[in-house]
Image: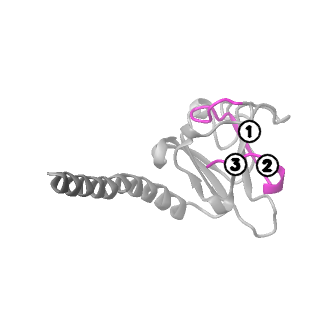
Amino acid sequence: MRKWFAATAAVGIALLGVSLPAGTAQAATACDNAWNGMPTGYMRAYQNAYCGGDMLGQSAGNDSNWGNGQGAFQGSDTNRASSVLNKGTTSGTTYTAVQFLNGTGTDWGGGYICLKRGELYADYLGDNYFTSGYNVNDAISSHRWLPPSACSKFLT
């Protein structure tokens, strides 16, 4: 009986290990496809995790207020991002990190978190926190481009 139980448990664990990454792999494929399809030099944000739902916008420049009527992100885009991508360029600039903030204005106040170009994307923002301690999911209000050395906290 013990051998049967051990064998059944081993098969169950093996099946669980095979089935769990499949969903993650499909989600990663959506963000991979989105990243590969976007223009070089841009960052992009999506309404849902895993690069799903509406694309809120994409930008090659800074946007100090995602909720106003100016810049690439406008109106209801503020506080709606659940996944972000970075395809910044290294050609002629060292500003290859995107700093996402939960504040607005050109003083760039409030908590922040960054995404390096080499990280490509953060497909689920719910497990990340701004330097202010607030959860990043559905809380980004602005962004700007910086050198990675100007950031002390990065998306995982």
Residue 131: quadrant of the picture:
top right
| Main SS category, magenta section | loop
Classed neighbour count for the residue bearing mark 1: other residues with Cα under 10 Å, few (<14), some (14–19), many (≥20): many
Residue nearest the viewer, comparing 3 with 80: 3
**Within the magenta stretch, is there residue 13?**
no
**Which of pointers 2 and 1 lies earlier in the amino acid sequence?**
1
Q: Are marks 2 and 3 in contact (CB under 8 Å)?
A: yes
For label 2, the SS is loop
Residue 118 position, x and y percent, is 66, 63
Please give the label number shown on residue 154: 3
Mark-to-mark CA distance, 1 and 3: 9 Å
Residue visible at 75% across and 37% down?
Answer: 64
Q: Nearer the viewer, residue 18 or 48?
A: 18
Q: Are marks 2 and 1 in contact (CB under 8 Å)?
A: yes
Image coordinates of residue 113 in percent, x first then y, are 71, 42
Image-based side of 45 in relation to 70, left or right: left
Q: Secondary structure at mark 1?
A: strand
State the SS at label 3: loop
Residue 149 sits inside the magenta stretch? yes
Which residue is under mark 1? 112
The residue positioned 54% from the left and 60% from the top of the image is: 35
The magenta stretch spans which residues? Answer: 133-156
Disc assigned to residue 82: none
Q: Residue at x 81, y 36 (%)?
A: 108
Residue occupied by mark 2:
151
